[in-house]
Image: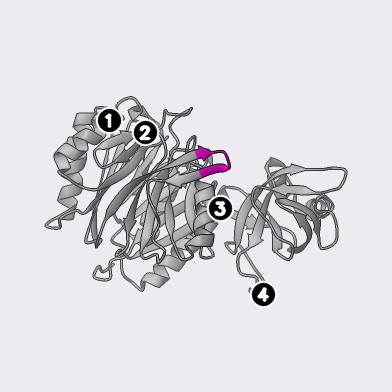
Amino acid sequence: MKAGGALVLTADPGAAATRAVAQATEALGDATPSLAVLFASAHYLGSAEALVAAIAERAGPLPLIGCVGQAVAGGAREVESEPAVSLWLGAGLGPVETFAMEFIQTSSGGAYGGYRFPREPQGAHLLICDPFTFPADGLLAHLNEQVPGAMVMGGMASAALGSRQSRLFLDDRALSRGAVGVRLPGAEVHPLVAQGCRPVGDAYIITAADGNVIRELGRRPPLVRLQEMAAALPGRDQELLARGVLLGLVIDEYRDVPGQGDFLIRGLVGADSGSGAVAVGGEIQVGQTVQFHVRDAASADEDLRRALARESAALGGRRPGGALLFTCNGRGSRMFAGPDHDAGLIATMLGDIPLAGFFCAGELGPVGGQNFLHTFTASMAIFRDPAAAR
């Protein structure tokens, strides 16, 4: 597998297409691209059709997915305020199948149409969704139950402010609703999801629950547990809890002492001061082990470093062929002291690899072998190339 990338800073669709295709093609050398991934900053909301048409004209007939996002990443850079286009070309990926999906409202709820996920999943799916018309979490829950082993990476488009304003790229077109994706059954894609949190206090077992409401943690009301824990924490952690309480669900119940990175993170979305119950942004079950979490820049940096270190060790000295980054629009300079944090750290720890990405309104990626919709994460699809040396 080989990839080439380009990051072009201009608001002109024709100029951006010409320069991006030339740079990414040159980086590929003699390899023939089989997939294009295109991300453009919010400046392109009004000219998305012209941009994707120009890319298709200059690159030739080529499967392509992408979107207009709030901001984009390319190489080791994250461009948050300037007009920018990030283009990624991949070669040697095996079969490539692009598709579009829609969510159709019905009297009984709704149905997903346009593409059927194979019952015997291979490789990976990349999926980019419109947050206003495509409830990705429902699709992922269905796949976890009905298509175990399916791997979905991607993100929710983030530039639009309302329904039908998003711009998703599919081949040579721009769509305003649904989702676009690509199936890569023969590619060696490794997922990396850094949730950017750390646990505080003690872990507890859910002893009473109903749907997404926790009524007891270790036989006591969860609000009581939270208040007691907060009183014993250092001042800095108390400040972080005041900004927002998060709950981690242990992924592997057989792990003796779960630590940072061993949880699926969900927010608390409500509480009842009378009963002490709390509501979680996701389904929970009696018997699950949970622990309260906090999030800050230091925790997010540490979590991503740890995940990249594991990936580097797994690569065994080889350099990835390329990567796609789906990072939250609450990260970047909104979370970290300087620019380019996620993309720059990836380049530092995995090498100067071809990378493209965008800032998402929700990130898709597997944790513990199941697919989830996340927030504040850096979700990354790493394309391994056994022939490449670091």
Marks 4 and 3, Cα distance to the nearest angstrom? 22 Å
Residue 214, relative to residue 17: is it above or below? below
| Front position among marks 4 and 3 | 4
Which quadrant is home to the C terminus? bottom left
Residue 41 placed where, x, y %? 36, 34
**66 and 144: which one is in front?**
144
Q: Amino acid at mark 1?
A: Glu
Marks 1 and 2, Cα distance to the nearest angstrom? 8 Å
> Tag 1, which secondary structure?
helix
Q: Which residue is mark 3?
A: 196
Residue 315 placed where, x, y %? 36, 70
Residue 144 placed where, x, y %? 52, 60
Q: Amino acid at mark 2?
A: Arg
Marks 4 and 1, Cα distance to the nearest angstrom? 53 Å
**74 and 173: which one is in front?**
173
- The answer to whether marks 1 and 2 mark residues whose Cβ atoms lie closer than 8 Å is yes
Q: Which residue is mark 1?
A: 49
- The residue depicted at 30 percent of the width and 49 percent of the height is 98
